[in-house]
Image (cartoon, helix red, strand yellow):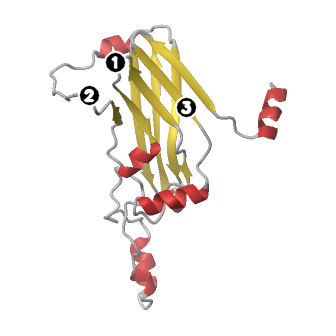
Amino acid sequence: MLDSLSAMMSHGFKSSKQDFTFGPWKVTAARNHIMKSKDIERLAEEMNMPSLPEMLFGDNVLRIHHADGYGIEFNAIDALKRVNNMEDAVKVACAQEWQEGRADSEHSKEVVRPYDWTYTTDYRGTLIGEDLQMEVVKTSERIDLEKLKAREQIMFFDEVLLFEDELHDHGVSMISVKIVSDYKLIITLRITVLKL
C-alpha cells in the first residue's frame, strides 16, 4: 500500500473515469484536476463574476445517459451558471464592524461587482438530449422509503466533487454528487454552504 501511495504522490493526482451499465442506462463518473487559474479567470470573466470557487473541478462530471439519447449530467460550470451574479446579499458576522472601522475610507464601501460569494446555486442537473421532446410532469408518486432502507448488494458507487471554497475563512461552500446502484439508481446532489 505504501508503494502505491508513494507512486501516486510522485506522479501527482491521477484522473479517473468509471463507466457502469445498468439496463439501457450508462453511468459515467469522471474526476479530474482542479482547473488551472488562467482557465478559472477566463470563465469568471465569461460568467461576469469577480471570482470563482478556489477549487473548481471543471472537467468533473456525473452523467446518466439512456440508450435512446436522453439523460442528465451534473457538472461544475452549469452549477455555477445558476449562482446569482447580480446580488451580494450574504454578509459575514463581522461585516458591519469592519465597515464601521473603515467609515472614513471611500474604498471600503465600493463593491466592484456584486455576486453571491457563497456560490449558492439552485442547480438540479443538466438535461441531455434537448433536441428530443422531453417534458417534466408533476407527479403524485413518492419515493418508497422502505425500499431505500432495504439492504441490497451495491453494484456501483461513486462521488464526484464539482467545486469547493472556504469562503475566505468564513465557512465552506461545496457541491458534490453521489450515485449508488443496487437494483435502482439513487443520485444525490449535495449543496453545502456553512457560514461561520
The amino acid pointed to by label 3 is Ala
Taking 91 as reference, is 155 above or below it? above
Q: Which quadrant of the rendered structure holds the N terminus?
A: top right
- Report the Cα–Cα distance between label 2 and label 1: 10 Å
Can you tell which quarter of the image residue 88 is in? bottom left
Find disc 2 in the rendering and name its residue: 132
Q: Residue 81: horizontal and vertical position, in percent?
A: 37, 51
Residue flagged by tag 2: what amino acid is it?
Leu
Question: Could you say whether the residue bearing mark 1 is in a helix, strand or loop?
Answer: loop
Question: Neighbour class for label 1 at 10 Å: few (<14), some, many (≥20)?
Answer: few
Give the residue type at disc 1.
Asp
Q: Is residue 16 left or right of residue 99?
A: right
Q: Earlier in the sequence, mark 1 or mark 3?
A: 3
Residue at the bottom extreme of this rendering: 104
- What residue did someone put label 3 on? 30
Observer-nearest residue: 128 or 64?
128
The residue tagged with tag 2: helix, strand or loop?
A: loop
Q: Residue at x 35, y 23 (%)?
A: 69
User: Can you say whether 96 is above or below 130 in the image?
Assistant: below
Identify the residue at the far front of this view: 131
Spatial CA span between label 1 and label 3? 22 Å
Residue at the disc numbered 1: 68
> Could you tell me if residue 170 is visible in this image?
no
